[in-house]
């Protein structure tokens, strides 16, 4: 509730001297008589209900004055709402799940780091349709485009290396993502492709998949994951897990060609911090445009307060002329 004339509420301070005057007058009007004992003057019913109700008319009048001041302040109720129009962005995320994503140059490994950063990216874009494609030697859709990001994030947790045939089919992963987003009615369609290797499998070349994406007006941001030079890779032996250094090979020319052909951009993530910065930059470049219009409707609410004032005055008058009537 709001008030059209809130300054009138300061008049409520006048109740303080009125209450003080009433207490002073009450004490002034009571006579005193000193006697040795008051037992002879006590009679049954001296503490009847009238003794307790004798202050009620004053309380009712104070309440009536307070409510009258509230009526003068003009209480109002307001109904407001927002109409938001968004320029929707649909995003397909294509993530490499080949076994090389277990390499430890990112912590705890490349795949887990990619999942964590991608989850933060998704949480920061509540208005977008986002889907997930995974690929290695083959590709499949883990989650189609959806605004139910809770479901998407739960499916994100399930992806792991070795869940499909090993290898690196960048072109096939990109083509699968394109097929899932090409029919979207959104004004902006984006694919974020993350890999740590060189295309060595699949029937579709990365450049061919990029041409298909360009045909449908899809921008592709590519991310190469892996430090420069060598990195530690875990592998299973008869005596448990051992580690060896492997050469980091990322097909940067192909990834740059894909992003350049589709109007996107290529990024290289050599550690967790740089990967976070990459997603933050993509998030900044692909922000949704939201225009908000606010509407407000006010309605006067003083009528009920005025009726309550009238009821209090009538009750005061009724009590003073019936139960609490003073007889000269």
Image (cartoon, rainbow, N blue to C red):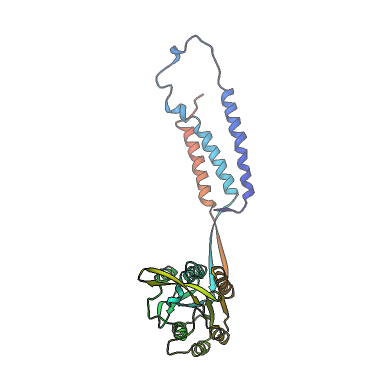
Identity of the residue drawn at 40% across and 79% down: 141
Q: Is residue 271 at all visible to an observer of this figure?
A: yes
Residue 159 appears in view: no
Q: Nearer the viewer, residue 88 or 316?
A: 88
How far from the left and from the top, in percent, is residue 70? 57, 47
Q: Observer-nearest residue: 106 or 11?
A: 106
Camera-side residue of 87 and 268: 268
x%, y% of residue 188? Answer: 53, 80
Task: Examine the image and state in which quarter residue 283 appears.
Answer: bottom right
Residue 186 is situated, as x and y percent measured from the top left of the image, at: 50, 80
In the rendered view, would you say 131 is above or below 216?
A: above
- Residue 216 falls left or right of residue 72: left
Give the mark count.
Answer: 0
Q: Is residue 220 above or below residue 109?
A: below
Q: Residue furthest front?
A: 239
Note whether 257 is above or below 47 in the view shown: below
Q: Position of residue 164 (x, y in %)?
A: 37, 79
Q: Within the image, what quadrant is residue 154 found in? A: bottom left
Q: Quadrant of residue 292?
A: bottom right
Question: Residue placed farthest to the left in the image?
Answer: 238
Q: Nearer the viewer, residue 89 or 229?
A: 229
Residue 281 in the figure: left or right of residue 128: right
């Amino acid at each position: 509730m709001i008030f059209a004339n809130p300054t009138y509420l300061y008049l409520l301070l006048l109740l303080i001297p009125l209450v003080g005057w009433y207490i002073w007058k009450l004490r002034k009007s009571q006579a005193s008589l000193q006697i040795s004992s008051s037992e002879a003057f006590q009679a049954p019913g001296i503490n009847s209900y009238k003794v307790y109700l004798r202050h009620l008319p004053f309380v009712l009048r104070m309440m009536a004055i307070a409510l009258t001041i509230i009526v003068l302040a003009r209480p109002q109720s307001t109904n407001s709402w927002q109409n938001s129009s968004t320029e929707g962005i649909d995003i397909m995320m294509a993530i490499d799940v080949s076994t090389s994503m277990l390499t430890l140059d990112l912590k705890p490994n490349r795949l887990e780091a990619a999942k964590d950063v991608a989850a933060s990216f998704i949480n920061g874009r509540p208005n977008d349709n986002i889907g997930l494609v995974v690929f290695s030697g083959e590709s499949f859709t883990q989650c189609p485009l959806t605004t139910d990001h809770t479901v998407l994030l739960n499916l994100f947790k399930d992806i792991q290396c070795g869940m499909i045939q090993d290898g690196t089919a960048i072109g096939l992963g990109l083509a699968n993502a394109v097929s899932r987003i090409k029919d979207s009615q959104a004004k902006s369609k984006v694919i974020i492709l993350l890999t740590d290797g060189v295309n060595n499998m699949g029937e579709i070349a990365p450049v061919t998949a990029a041409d298909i994406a360009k045909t449908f007006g899809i921008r592709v941001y590519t991310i190469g994951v892996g430090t420069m030079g060598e990195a530690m890779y875990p592998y299973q032996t008869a005596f448990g897990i051992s580690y060896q250094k492997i050469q980091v090979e990322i097909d940067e020319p192909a990834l740059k060609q894909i992003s350049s052909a589709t109007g996107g951009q290529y990024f290289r993530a050599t550690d967790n911090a740089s990967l976070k910065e990459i997603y933050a930059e993509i998030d900044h470049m692909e922000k949704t445009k939201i225009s908000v219009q606010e509407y407000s409707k006010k309605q006067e609410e003083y009528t009920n307060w005025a009726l309550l004032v009238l009821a209090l005055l009538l009750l005061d008058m009724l009590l003073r002329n019936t139960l609490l009537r003073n007889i000269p």
